[in-house]
Image (spheres, rainbow, N blue to C red):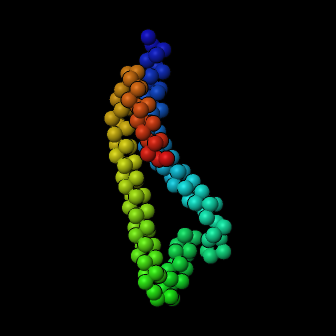
Amino acid sequence: NIKNTCINVLKGFMAASLVTVVPQRLYSLCVALQGTFSYELLGGFIGATSSTVAGTGLSVIVALASDVSLFSLFFIILFGYCTVKVVFANIKRGGIMLCQIAVGSLYLFGVPRGYTDGFYSWCKQVIATCL
């Protein structure tokens, strides 16, 4: 059937042109939404302190360093641990997205032939990784 073949070829071209663009844009959208949500949720607490996360963190470290006690030392260590943990979690998630993009190109060979179930499952995995 020529009609189904043409539709499958168009699906293949669309998938090939979007397989590297859409996951990256979706990931950046999710990261931006996380930043917006965290600012909106914590804006009342840190709104008067600073407008950036780095400025807020710096002011917290300066406030903790001015008072030398075991409690403030504990919070400085805890603050450093949380910062490193968040940075490495985002690097890990970005690496998983790069692997997902590389694997997604393998599913493209089946799309023009009509085998789209693997590609659809890959799309669901990309969405789940971004969220």
User: As displayed, is residue 27 above or below residue 80?
Assistant: above
| Relative image position of residue 31 (x, y in whole percent) | 51, 55
Q: Residue farthest to the front?
A: 70
Q: Nearer the viewer, residue 15 or 44?
A: 44
| Relative image position of residue 11 (x, y in whole percent) | 46, 27
| Relative image position of residue 26 (x, y in whole percent) | 51, 46
**Where's the N terminus, which quadrant?**
top left
Q: Nearer the viewer, residue 66 or 102?
A: 66
| Relative image position of residue 103 (x, y in whole percent) | 34, 39
- Give the tally of numbered discs: 0
Residue at the image position 47 percent from the left and 81 percent from the top: 72
Quadrant position of residue 91 = bottom left
Residue at the image position 45 percent from the left and 36 percent from the top: 124
Residue at the image position 46 percent from the left and 42 percent from the top: 128
Relative to 112, 53 lies left or right: right
Quadrant position of residue 82 = bottom left
Q: Note whether residue 76 is visible.
A: no
User: As displayed, is residue 29 above or below residue 46?
Assistant: above
Q: Note whether residue 127 is visible.
A: yes
